[in-house]
Image (cartoon, helix red, strand yellow):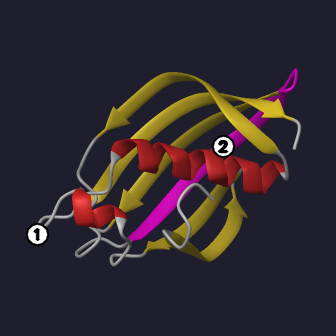
Amino acid sequence: MLLKNFYSVLDSSEKDDKNITQIKINKDHAIYDGHFPGRPVTPGVILMNLFKEEAERRCACKLQFKKGNNVKFMAVVDPNTDAILNLETEITEENQEIKLKGIAKNSAGISLKINSIYKKVES
């Protein structure tokens, strides 16, 4: 986990070839002291990393980000109003690479769409 105690997994399941993981963001995490005081916003790079960590959890391996084919930030994730995120992922493995197609949703709608490729790395 890139940021210790940043989030906790509430539920994880598979449905129609998609993995669905519900997480709860820790609104009191120190990252929000600087991003931004009085108006916390979850950094985009942290949202992207949630998907990397989800892929690592699903494949039980360490991964390194290789390429983001399509990354779209659709809405701000405010931990005070939308601390629950649903990560929908489709993960495939090919030639020591993990390909991920994902969507992060909260009560306000879609926050992030991502298509990314990760390289397996030795622990």
Q: Measuring from the top left, give residue 7's x and y in whole percent.
A: 51, 71
* Residues drawn in magenta: 84-96
Ranked by sequence position, the earlier of labels 2 and 1 is: 1
Q: Quadrant of the N terminus?
A: bottom right
Q: Is residue 21 left or right of residue 113?
A: right
Q: Measuring from the top left, give residue 65's x and y in whole percent.
A: 63, 31
Above or below, 26 against 1 in this view is: below
Q: Nearer the viewer, mark 2 or mark 1?
A: 1
Q: Helix or strand or loop: what does disc 1 sit on?
A: loop
Q: Measuring from the top left, give residue 118's x and y in whole percent.
A: 69, 30
Q: Residue at x 74, y 49 (%)?
A: 56
Q: Is residue 84 left or right of residue 69?
A: left
Q: Amino acid at mark 2?
A: Glu
Task: Determine which quarter of the picture holds residue 77.
Answer: bottom left
Q: Which residue is mark 2?
A: 90
Q: Residue at x 48, y 68 (%)?
A: 6
Task: Determine which quarter of the picture holds residue 64.
Answer: top right
Q: Measuring from the top left, give residue 37's x and y in whole percent.
A: 15, 65
- Give whichever of 23, 2 is nearer the camera: 2
Magenta span: predominant SS is: strand
Q: Residue at x 23, y 52 (%)?
A: 76
Alpha-carbon span between mark 2 and mark 1: 35 Å
Label 1: how many residues lie within 10 Å, few (<14), some (14-19) or many (20+)? few
Q: Which residue is mark 1?
A: 38
